[in-house]
């Protein structure tokens, strides 16, 4: 039986890597710095799994639905209607950032860059 439950015979043991011989606490600190505490996994076109950081709803506010408004008149607001129909529920803002929908958020480019980094790291090595 392999010493690590995730070890696979087809997996490269990464014997040349300086990362894996490090103490687990240091590796976990690196993971915590790179990968956010909450992520969304979702399917894109052609059933490809995508990873996106959760920017989450503001927990200290009452979420009445009016925070989804983009214009003054809620009766004719197509963006608000899309947000209310979102299958992501209160994480509609996470959906807009992940899928590149809606207006620009101040942190959108930071989240997109982080998602690219996070996806690249998770795809780079099965052992991670």
Image (cartoon, grey):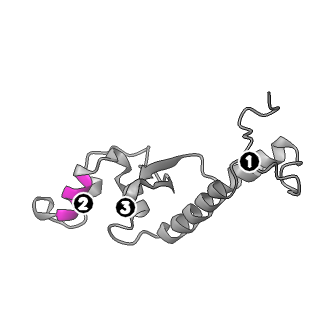
For residue 11, which numbered disc appears in the image?
A: 1
- Indicate the position of residue 78 as horizontal and vertical percent values: 17, 64
Q: Name the residue nearer the viewer: 78 or 59.
A: 78
Query: For the view shown, which residue lies furthest in the top direction?
Result: 1
Label 2 sits on residue: 69
Side of 32 where 67 appears, left or right: left
Determine whether the residue tagged by mark 2 lies in a helix, strand or loop: loop
Q: Is residue 5 above or below residue 17?
A: above
For residue 19, which numbered disc appears in the image?
A: none
| Residue plotted at (32% across, 68% down) | 102
Q: Local crowd at mark 1 within 10 Å, few (<14), some, or many (≥20)?
A: few
Separation (CA) of disc 2 from disc 1: 49 Å
N-term-proximal mark, 1 vs 3: 1
Separation (CA) of disc 1 from disc 3: 36 Å
Nearer to us of marks 2 and 1 is 1
User: In the rendered structure, which segment of residues is drawn in magenta?
Assistant: 78-84
Side of 18 where 62 appears, left or right: left
């Amino acid at each position: 039986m392999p010493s690590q439950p995730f070890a696979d015979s087809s997996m490269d043991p990464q014997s040349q890597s300086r990362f894996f011989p490090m103490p687990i606490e240091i590796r976990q600190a690196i993971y915590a710095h790179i990968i956010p505490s909450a992520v969304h996994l979702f399917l894109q076109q052609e059933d490809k799994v995508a990873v996106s950081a959760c920017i989450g709803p503001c927990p200290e506010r009452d979420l009445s639905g009016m925070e989804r408004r983009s214009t003054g008149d809620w009766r004719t607001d197509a963006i608000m209607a899309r947000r209310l129909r979102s299958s992501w529920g209160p994480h509609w803002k996470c959906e807009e950032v992940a899928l590149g929908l809606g207006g620009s958020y101040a942190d959108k480019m930071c989240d997109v860059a982080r998602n690219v980094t996070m996806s690249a790291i998770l795809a780079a090595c099965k052992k991670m």
